[in-house]
Image (spheres, coloured by chain):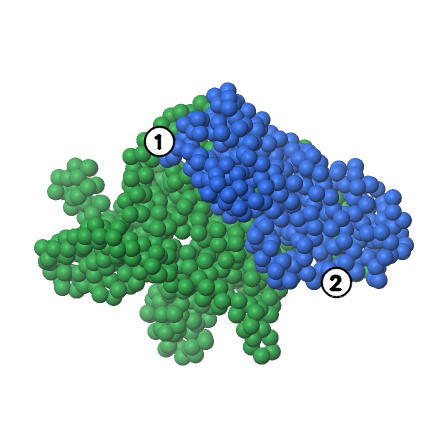
Chain colours: A blue, B green
Amino acid sequence: MTSRHSITTAGARLLLGGTILAAAAGSAFAQSVPESEDPIKMTVNDWTGQEITTRVMGGVLEEMGYNVEYVQADYLAQFAGLESGDLDVAMEIWETTGKDALTKSLETGDTVDLGETGMEAKEEWWYPAYVKEDCPGLPDWKALNECAELFASPETSPKGRYLGGPVTWGGHDEERIEALGLDFEVIHAGTDAALLAEVQSAYQRKKPILAWIYAPHWAPIQFEGEWVKFPEYEDACYEDASWGVNEEKAYDCGKPYGWIKAVGWAGGEEKWPAAYQAIRNFTMTNEDMGEMIGKVDVDGMPLQVVVDEWIDANQDTWKSWIPKG
Amino acid sequence: MSLATATSPAPAARPFAGRLVWLAAIAVLVVLWQIAPSVAWIGDPASVYILPLQGWISSAMDWLVDDLSFGLFTFKELTRAIAWLLGLPLKACIAVLSKGWHLPIGADGVFVPPVPWFGVVAAVTWLGWRLGGRSLAILVALCFLYLAVFGQWASAMITLSSILVAVPVGVVVGIALGIVAHRSETLAALIRPLLDLMQTVPVFAYLVPVLFLFGFGPVSAMIATIIYAMPPMVRVTMLALKSVPPEVVEFGHMAGCTPRQMLWRILLPAARPSLMVGVNQVIMLSLNMVIIASMIGAGGLGRDVLTSLRRLAIGDGLEAGIAITLLAISLDRLSQAFVYRQKQPLHLEQGMGFLVRHATLSVFFGVVVASLLVAAFEPSIALYPKSMMLSTAPFWDGLVEFVNVHLYEYLDAIKAFLLINVLVPLKRFMVDAPWLGVVVILAVAGMRLGGVRLAIAVSLMAAFIALTGNWEKAMISVYLCGLSVIIASLIGIPIGILSARHDGFRRVARTTIDTLQTLPSFVYLIPVVMLFAVGDFSAMIAIVLYALAPAVRYADHGIRRVPANIMEAGTMAGCRPSQLLWKVQLPLAMPELMLGLNQTIMMALSMLVITALVGTNDLGQEVYIALTRADIGHGVVAGLCVAFIAMIADRLINAWAENRKRQLQLD
């Protein structure tokens, strides 16, 4: 381990898991950590995985001696707060849903990219395992048209119904349907609660459903099912119309795996340099995250307990994030 | 009758001419419909020109936030100062009820814990007993015990804290604005349309500006709550001050009151009972905002509801939602009891001590302090024991699953029938109707019901919607709300009539309606989606459930208000009960029924933003998208469109009800 773990304000701090970390000497940074007593305001959005990521990082920052404050904020509305300095750190911006907002925000110069979190966002058309009995061609996307009737509803019939995410998630599903010539119509759920309510309802009744499911999330853990296999994503697919099956249109492929990045208020770079460095060093695997989400959302364990367990069990991992002295 | 028509702006005495105007209007609509495909701007003006209002509003907002300065401080500094100021009492309340606070005494400071749960329960029970006797004490005690027993305590205290700050601020500012409007006709003319907007623009539309100006966190959520909950207080104040009996005012003048004395010693005390109605409204509306406030950082019960439903723990969501309802009921009944108590003046004698004179408050604080002391000696009992908590969540989850698995086929058949035969055709019709034709129809209706000014007002508002490029979304909103309102009226009015006739039925109906109105709609929205899937049908059910209440209330009120002598005359004339209903009660109750309809429409429109969460494709969705993209201009413009739809409906219905009242000579 490192020569220096953390410095806390009053000598030592009781670790949630019961460990006591002693203060250590030496610092690579000009000032001692914490450089400022002001709380680092971390945003909590409205999905479990994000809150876990945030609380894990927050817990580590507290170990380092920082004051941390958790502020609830909307996923996209939070950029305004990050730019003005009302908020300091947002731990999960998904390439798939937040890339445009992030790029726009970074261009203002008021926010800084705090690097990838190591997790990869998987988002794609998904169906429960039992659907395969009626539509054996799956998961190949070419089988979708033969089974369109299976997924149809009175509003979309004879076309199949694909339950997409909220409009704000983007995802280019309308374009994908057109480019690949699919006999489907996108119905946008307003929130992911509504999206999952319908998936769960269909799952309980063993009825066919085709919906936008993403990971890391509890749904693919709880529900047995598969993602449709579209032609593998490449940048060229979205940018170059001539790429792929349809030579005249872009988006004739699946969705990209996306990074999940942390982003911070630019002013924090000066204010809490060591903290920002630790956030840049943060890594988490999809497996660890999936397991924690399952414990909270499927098993109903309190979120903080799950986070504390992880912090306790993975000391080596998170200690390596703390910048060395 | 002749008198009534003489004063009426609408020439009701010439029905033939009236019909001609209508026929002409419909002819114009049909012609426009026919030529719409060939002339783009008749079908949808957005294809030709869109008023760049969104950009203007966004720039104006940037200017407010970044540039506006009053010399010594900027506008943003001013709003941030307000936020800081409002944050102080909020922090204090949260400290007392939920988090405890550090006193900087000695080297390490002293930690004062929050009031333990049994202290709060005892204190509110005492308050209930003093204000409303035994039954109120039991009710309040049970409500607060629920919070402890069902494990909602911590969140409920955070929600209660923000209500305890938001309500007084809303009441004080509301009364102040009401007084200002009462004193100056000019200001009243400015404030009235502002109130209309505050009540009809969907909350999501101003959440983003509020976030920009007041920062992120619980204080901003509280400010949004205040904006939403305050308008009824202003209205009630204006009305209450106006309706103080002239004798009382006269007496004040004779006693030589200065204007200030007049206000504080005469007008406000005389208006006090009416003012309490406003306070009650502020409480209820603040609790309505709990869910939305939690989306921008209020935390508490609203957040519990949202996070539970995100993981589809319907039972957990319901229990947290019921906690909000019970908080609303307790605060509502306590405030009503407080008004009632004021009617019996307290007998004070010389020499009574402060503690005796303020016995209620003294004991209240005594109980709080005592419970703190008890908890200090025995800290383990300060928190309600986990082992004694209950949860009915598995039952509710099971119930929804049962209905879903076993009754889905039937529900789905009904849904498919209605969708294919009613919803889809109606939606097509509304979306296809040419905007200019609709504007003409509205103008004619305005002309006939209220004269030239009304006609100009409604057509301008409709034109605004078209010119800002929101016509199609607006028509989808109108279709969704219109259909829901019709269904809500068809269900609600008969219930109201029944409840006017049977007191027993009335009690059941009222409890159901109160629950439906205070239970956060998100709680039943998710089960509705499970049973009816994402789409307009689910949205419609949610709107009907929420908008039912005014239809029932006003029908009940209207029937009960029919004068007894008229009823008697009807009976004497040999009316059968059904004739009595159709020929006497319903026609006479028509103005109330129309006001009920008006309120039903308002409720339906206010649900649009919530139904956007299950995926509609209307103005509510636009407002919601704008919220998530922090696009102020877009959100405000779409919000204004919703407000204008509401105002068009409101003005037309009011004009109709006024005419009708005049004809029936009910005034």
**Position of residue B225 measured from the top left corner of the image (x, y, whole percent):** 51, 56
Mark 2 lies on a secondary structure that is helix
Residue B402 visible in the current orientation: no
A38 vs A130: above or below: below
Instruction: Please state which of residues B417 and A168 is positioned toward the viewer in this rendering.
Output: A168
Parent chain of label 2: A
Closer to viewer: mark 1 or mark 2: 2
Residue B260, by quadrant, is: bottom left
Q: Point out residue B548 in the picture as x, y percentages from the top left corner.
A: 36, 43
Disc 1 crowd, CA 10 A, few/some/many (<14, 14-19, 20+): some
Vertical arrangement, residue A58 with respect to residue B224, above or below: above
Q: CA distance from mark 1 to mark 2?
A: 60 Å
Q: Which residue is mark 2?
A: A270
The chain under label 1 reads: B
Q: Is residue B570 at all visible to an observer of this figure?
A: yes
Front residue of this view, candidates B267 and B579: B579
Identify which amino acid the numbered label 1 is placed on: Ala
What amino acid type is highlighted by mark number 2?
Answer: Glu
